Amino acid sequence: MRYVAAALLVALGGKDVSEANIKKLLDVVGVDCDAEKAKLVVKELAGKDVEELIAAGQEKLASVPSGGGAAAAPAAAAAGGAAPAAAKEEKKEEPEEESDDDMGFGLFD
């Protein structure tokens, strides 16, 4: 992934995506460069427009679920709604925690 990111940074910086430019960028940030991986990235990006690749990646990323809410909703529906009711009961049983207020001093005093 670091080689792809380096290649995109090189391209967005207005330089040609080449092994030498990727190596130079990685050296600046203190990362060792594997010549084979850099060569593979250069080969795969050859002749492709970086802006189009980023746009295509954003479209693909938009279809990837993130967070647990989407997966929990179908599971709750499949269980007949029992899971949310159980969660509410658990919440009621928890003792209330005491507030520490400002412990005698304020954040901006």
Image (spheres, grey):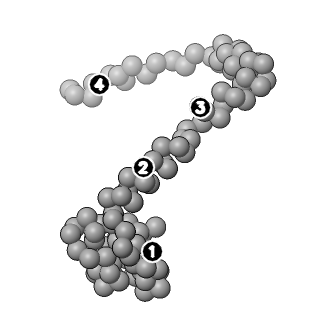
Disc 3 crowd, CA 10 A, few/some/many (<14, 14-19, 20+): few
Q: Is residue 4 above or below residue 81?
A: below
Residue drawn at the location 42% of the way across and 49% of the way down: 58
Q: Secondary structure at mark 1?
A: helix
Relative image position of residue 108 (x, y in whole percent):
22, 28
Residue drawn at the location 37% of the way across and 68% of the way down: 48
Q: Is residue 86 left or right of residue 34?
A: right
Residue drawn at the location 31% of the way across and 85% of the way down: 20
Q: Which mark is residue 82?
A: none
Q: Secondary structure at mark 2?
A: helix
Find residue 104 and report its image quarter: top left
Sequence order check: which comes first, mark 2 or mark 4? Answer: 2
Furthest-right residue in this view: 79
Dot in front, 4 or 1: 1
Using the image as rendered, state which of residue 101 and residue 38 is in the foreground.
Answer: 38
Relative image position of residue 91 (x, y in whole percent):
65, 17
Answer whether labels 4 and 1 touch (C-beta < 8 Å).
Answer: no
Find residue 50 and report its image quarter: bottom left
| Amino acid type for the residue under numbered disc 1 | Glu
Identify the image quadrant of the C terminus: top left
Disc 1 crowd, CA 10 A, few/some/many (<14, 14-19, 20+): few
Sequence order check: which comes first, mark 4 or mark 1? Answer: 1
Sequence order check: which comes first, mark 3 or mark 2? Answer: 2
Find the distance from the CA under tag 1 to the CA under tag 2.
18 Å
Question: Is residue 90 among what the camera can see?
Answer: no
Disc 4 crowd, CA 10 A, few/some/many (<14, 14-19, 20+): few
Q: Name the residue tied to disc 2.
A: 58
Sequence order check: which comes first, mark 3 or mark 4? Answer: 3
Dot in front, 1 or 3: 1
Dot in front, 2 or 4: 2
Q: Name the residue tied to disc 1.
A: 44
Q: Which mark is residue 105?
A: 4
